[in-house]
Image (spheres, grey):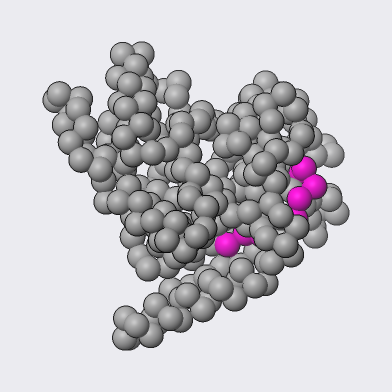
């Protein structure tokens, strides 16, 4: 792939934050595959897990490291950091502690081209700190009216937008802080997952609402990852569809794996990291 304007400067990692205030939308899956895709392209990638309680992002890279050690199969590994919530009782002390922990992680990862951050599905000071660091914010979204409410309050009977959501306001606040500090605004990309699993009429209605919200709230839309078994079946091995075929993997060439690889490549292009004609 040919690199475009999102290529980070040599001295400053480009930060991709995967965030949403709703669980089950594929945040960790998206973060994992973006990380592996970037490493496959030869970039040094740092990863930060702000959702230490769930720990899916951390578990994947632990599994990946174990797989590489046990099999001898060459696997790219990120420089991974997990940030725990502070146990300080005073809010000011807790916030200072968490800000310091995150800054320490960024200092450790300063030699990376990219840093990918997985965030929890709930509002917290640490979550806000992570969003404030985003050059690109990726918000996975399942195609349902319930999931759209992570972006805005919807009148389901009239299929109309009533007001921005708490999460949209969080993103606006962090974006405004960046602008005030003379930093580039957040490039917010909403990724639509599992497009093939809903009825056609609902899909059209959801598409129309998302186009309206994109203009009103200020994000871009991109296709995401389908709910493919291939994305789950290799998690415990620390593998993705981009790692296949492995030696001795008789299913490496299946159409499901090929489709999964295309989805990841399309997602990388849609986010704007690389030019579309150089996949």
Residue at 15% over, 24% down? 158
62 displayed left or right of 53 = right
Quarter of the picture holding the C terminus: top right
Write down the region rendered in magenta: 40-48
**Is 167 situated above or below 127?**
above
**Is 191 situated above or below 98?**
above
Question: Looking at the image, can residue 138 be seen?
Answer: no
Residue at 36% over, 22% down? 207
* Residue 229: quarter of image: top right
Report the front residue among 53 and 173.
Answer: 173
Furthest-top residue in this view: 200
128 displayed left or right of 29 = left
Residue at 38% over, 81% down? 94
- Tell whether position 42 is magenta: yes
Number of numbered labels in the structure image? 0
Quarter of the picture holding the N terminus: top right
Question: Looking at the image, can residue 268 be seen?
Answer: yes
């Amino acid at each position: 792939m040919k690199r475009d304007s999102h290529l980070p400067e040599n001295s400053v990692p480009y930060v991709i934050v995967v965030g949403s205030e709703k669980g089950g939308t594929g945040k960790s899956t998206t973060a994992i595959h973006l990380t592996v895709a970037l490493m496959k392209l030869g970039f040094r990638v740092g990863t930060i897990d702000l959702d230490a309680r769930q720990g899916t992002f951390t578990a994947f890279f632990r599994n990946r490291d174990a797989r590489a050690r046990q099999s001898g199969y060459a696997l790219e590994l990120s420089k991974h950091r997990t940030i725990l919530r502070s146990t300080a009782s005073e809010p000011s002390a807790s916030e200072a502690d968490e800000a310091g922990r995150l800054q320490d992680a960024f200092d450790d990862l300063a030699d990376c081209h990219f840093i990918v951050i997985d965030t929890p599905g709930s509002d917290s000071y640490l979550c806000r700190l992570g969003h404030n660091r985003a050059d690109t914010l990726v918000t996975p979204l399942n195609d349902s009216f319930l999931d759209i409410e992570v972006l805005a309050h919807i009148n389901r009977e009239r299929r109309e937008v009533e007001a921005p959501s708490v999460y949209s306001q969080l993103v606006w606040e962090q974006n405004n802080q960046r602008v005030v500090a003379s930093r580039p605004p957040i490039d917010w990309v909403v990724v639509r997952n599992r497009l093939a699993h809903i009825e056609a009429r609902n899909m059209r209605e959801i598409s129309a609402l998302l186009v309206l919200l994109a203009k009103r709230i200020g994000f871009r839309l991109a296709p995401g990852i389908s709910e493919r078994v291939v994305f789950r079946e290799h998690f415990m091995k620390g593998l993705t569809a981009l790692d296949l075929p492995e030696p001795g993997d008789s299913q490496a060439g299946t159409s499901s794996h090929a489709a999964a690889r295309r989805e990841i490549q399309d997602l990388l292009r849609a986010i704007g990291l690389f030019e579309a004609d150089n996949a």
